[in-house]
Amino acid sequence: MAGPDRNPIRRLLALPNESRTKTVLVAFLVSAVCAALVSGATVMLRPIQAANRAAEEQARIAALVEGIPGMAELLERSGGELSTVVIDLESGRAAQEVTPATLQTALADPANWTALDAGEDLAGLGQRPDYVQVFLLRNGEEISLVLLPLSGQGYGGRIDAIMALRGDMNNVAGIAVTNHSETPGLGGRIEEAAWQAGFPGTELRDASGEVQFRVARGTASSVHEVDGITGATRTGRGVTNMVRFWMGPDGYGPLMDAIRRGEF
């Protein structure tokens, strides 16, 4: 006479289909297998998703560059192509362990953000990422154009923009506002090409090296100013503070110094 079957799988399958134990165990096994398959697919697809995000970002930047007054012509004349690199803001150098493909993953870690105290936080951000993706155009060995993402608080909420600087890291080539919540018809005019057209040729710093850029209350009266928007003083102040923060020592200052010294 044969002994009892000690194989747990065969014993489970031998149970009647109406058995509650069999139903629960089969449901558990199916759920476990499905969860494993989903997890495996997520891991396998993650590099592809990251690459797609990077490609989309490149396409978005290319479109923005073409929208900045004079940028398309500049790229065409130079015959160059924009390259991208992730910068460690503290050192002003290329990040060693973070790439454009892994940047979003890195910034999901709170350890990769720096808290800003009130005296440092001109842009009203509260904290600043330690790594930022920037875009460079080289003319031979020299950097002729740099595109720098900016963010800060306006009147209605956060303002995001990209500022293009010439290779001297002082002369503004253009700006593109990519996101804002400002009042339509007032501060919301910062997205208009007519207002953004006032940025090319503006100088960030004076002869002593101090950042003097600002949005004027009315018509610009110096090389460091751009025209203000009537009825949108707080929006203009937000743009002023955003630019001053990111062009200063807690923003892109170390990177800009390295570029001016020819070390990047």
Image (tube, grey):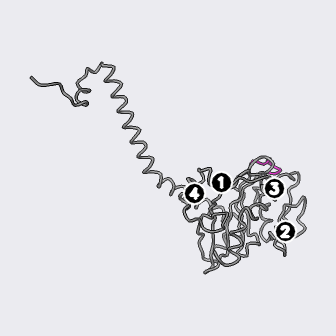
Image quadrant holding the C terminus, namely bottom right
| Mark 4–mark 2 distance (CA, rounded to whole Å) | 33 Å
Q: Position of residue 147 (x, y in %)?
A: 67, 66
| Mark 4–mark 1 distance (CA, rounded to whole Å) | 12 Å
Q: What residue is pinned by disc 1?
A: 113
Label located before the other in sequence (2 or 3): 3
Q: Which mark is residue 103?
A: 4
Q: Which mark is residue 119?
A: 3
Label located before the other in sequence (4 or 2): 4
- Amino acid type shown at disc 2: His
In this view of the protein, which residue sits in the foreground, 134 or 219?
Answer: 134
Q: Quadrant of residue 80?
A: bottom right
Q: What residue is pinned by disc 2?
A: 224
Label 2, residues with CA under 10 Å away: few <14, some 14-19, many ≥20: many
| Tag in front: 4 or 3 | 3
Q: Which mark is residue 58?
A: none
Q: Is residue 185 magenta?
A: yes
Q: Position of residue 254 (x, y in %)?
A: 70, 68
In this view of the protein, which residue sits in the foreground, 210 or 173?
Answer: 210
Q: Quadrant of residue 114?
A: bottom right
Label located before the other in sequence (3 or 1): 1
| Mark 1–mark 2 distance (CA, rounded to whole Å) | 31 Å
Residue 202 appears in the picture as rendered: no
Q: Is residue 52 magenta?
A: no
- Residue at figure coordinates x 51%, y 55% from the top left: 50
Q: Secondary structure at mark 3?
A: loop
Q: CB under 8 Å between callouts 4 and 2?
A: no
Q: In the figure, 200 relative to 48: above or below? A: below
Count the marks: how many?
Answer: 4
